Image: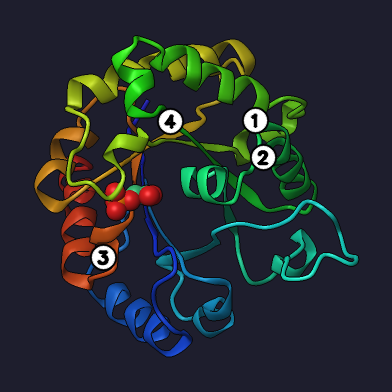
């Protein structure tokens, strides 16, 4: 099967509405659309409206949402509120799990609510450094998949994306080697093949992805894209990463 790449930028709590709009306009000018390449950015909620409809080359996602449809949940955003503003939604990012204490069950409820609302969830999974050092990486990641993706209906699998982000590699400048990443991606691919046979669920790598390591990461057999934090905040470095995808697609 021909390769496809998904290059995503998680902006976290950076960029105002105006900055986001300007960024998306500049980013769209920096690369040519090519079959097999999907580029997406995940701005803060407050910038989602300002980046609407700017350019079909740049897809838009939200960074989180709550699972309830509406109600007395001060400060939360519902799946329905994202409809028309976001195509994708990041769920279970390690910062949500660690800082805001989201459990696997919360993440699963969010994921099913997102699918129900026609949004495409990107489920983030990954191990801590002590878990890696004590040989528990695969156990942790497969458990997060098992819980996070429980109850996904057959027809919904094509709308699911997984992001493997080792927590020790996020924002630390210390990325997994391509071999370490591929080992976990291989295990995730085998797990997904058992749950959704024949459906090519995308699995992104994230954690200190930069222009100088993305070509090698994207070359790994089971890595179908990257989820980029810090290096996605600057048009030059993010488009250099997109360029690696284009190079591997032969464009
Ligand atoms: P980083 O963040 O690229 O800055 O390590 C990745 C992420 O948290 O998604």
**Does the residue tagged 3 have its C-beta within 8 Å of any atom of ligand 1?**
no
Left or right of 7, for residue 147: right
Q: CA distance from mark 3 to mark 4?
A: 32 Å
Image colouring: rainbow
**Does the residue tagged 4 have its C-beta within 8 Å of any atom of ligand 1?**
no
Question: Does residue 246 appear anywhere in the picture?
Answer: yes
Examine the image and state in which quarter residue 149 appears: top right
Position of the N terminus by quadrant? top left
Q: CA distance from mark 4 to mark 1?
A: 12 Å
Report which residue position mark 3 lands on.
32
Which disc, if any, is residue 16?
A: none
Going from the N terminus, do you reach mark 1 or mark 3 first? 3
The residue closer to the viewer here, 134 or 142, is 134
Give coordinates of residue 207: x percent, y percent.
29, 42
Q: CA distance from mark 1 to mark 2?
A: 6 Å
Instruction: Give yes or no for contact between labels 1 and 2 (Cβ–Cβ under 8 Å).
Output: yes
Q: CA distance from mark 1 to mark 3?
A: 35 Å
Going from the N terminus, do you reach mark 1 or mark 2 first? 2
Give coordinates of residue 22: x percent, y percent.
35, 86
Q: Residues within 10 Å of mark 3 (few under 14, many from 20)?
A: few
Report which residue position mark 1 lands on.
148
Going from the N terminus, do you reach mark 4 or mark 1 first? 4
Report which residue position mark 4 lands on.
126
> Residue shown at 66%/36% (left/top)?
103
Total marks placed: 4
Q: Secondary structure at mark 3?
A: loop
Left or right of 47, for residue 250: left
> Residue shown at 41%/27% (left/top)?
127
Q: CA distance from mark 4 to mark 2?
A: 14 Å
The residue closer to the viewer here, 57 or 228, is 228
């Amino acid at each position: 099967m021909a390769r496809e790449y998904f290059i995503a930028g998680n902006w976290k709590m950076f960029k105002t509405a105006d900055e986001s709009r300007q960024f998306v306009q500049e980013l769209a000018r920096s690369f040519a659309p090519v079959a097999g390449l999907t580029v997406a950015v995940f701005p803060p909620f407050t910038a989602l409206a300002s980046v609407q409809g700017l350019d079909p080359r740049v897809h838009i996602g939200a960074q989180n949402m709550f699972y309830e449809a509406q109600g007395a949940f001060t400060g939360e955003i519902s799946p329905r509120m994202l409809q028309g503003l976001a195509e994708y939604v990041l769920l279970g990012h390690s910062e949500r799990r660690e800082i805001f204490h989201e459990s696997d069950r919360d993440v699963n409820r969010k994921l099913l609510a997102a699918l129900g609302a026609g949004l495409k969830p990107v489920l983030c999974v990954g191990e801590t450094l002590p878990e890696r050092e004590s040989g528990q990486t695969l156990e942790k990641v497969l458990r997060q998949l098992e819980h996070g993706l429980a109850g996904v209906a057959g027809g919904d699998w094509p709308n699911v994306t997984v992001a493997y982000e080792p927590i020790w590699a996020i924002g630390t400048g210390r990325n997994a080697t391509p071999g370490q990443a591929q080992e976990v991606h291989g295990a995730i691919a085998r797990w997904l093949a058992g749950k959704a046979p024949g459906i090519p669920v995308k699995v992104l790598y994230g954690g200190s992805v930069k222009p100088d390591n993305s070509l090698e990461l994207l070359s790994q057999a089971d890595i179908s894209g990257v989820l980029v934090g810090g290096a996605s905040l600057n048009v030059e470095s993010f488009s250099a990463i997109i360029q690696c995808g284009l190079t591997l697609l032969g464009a």
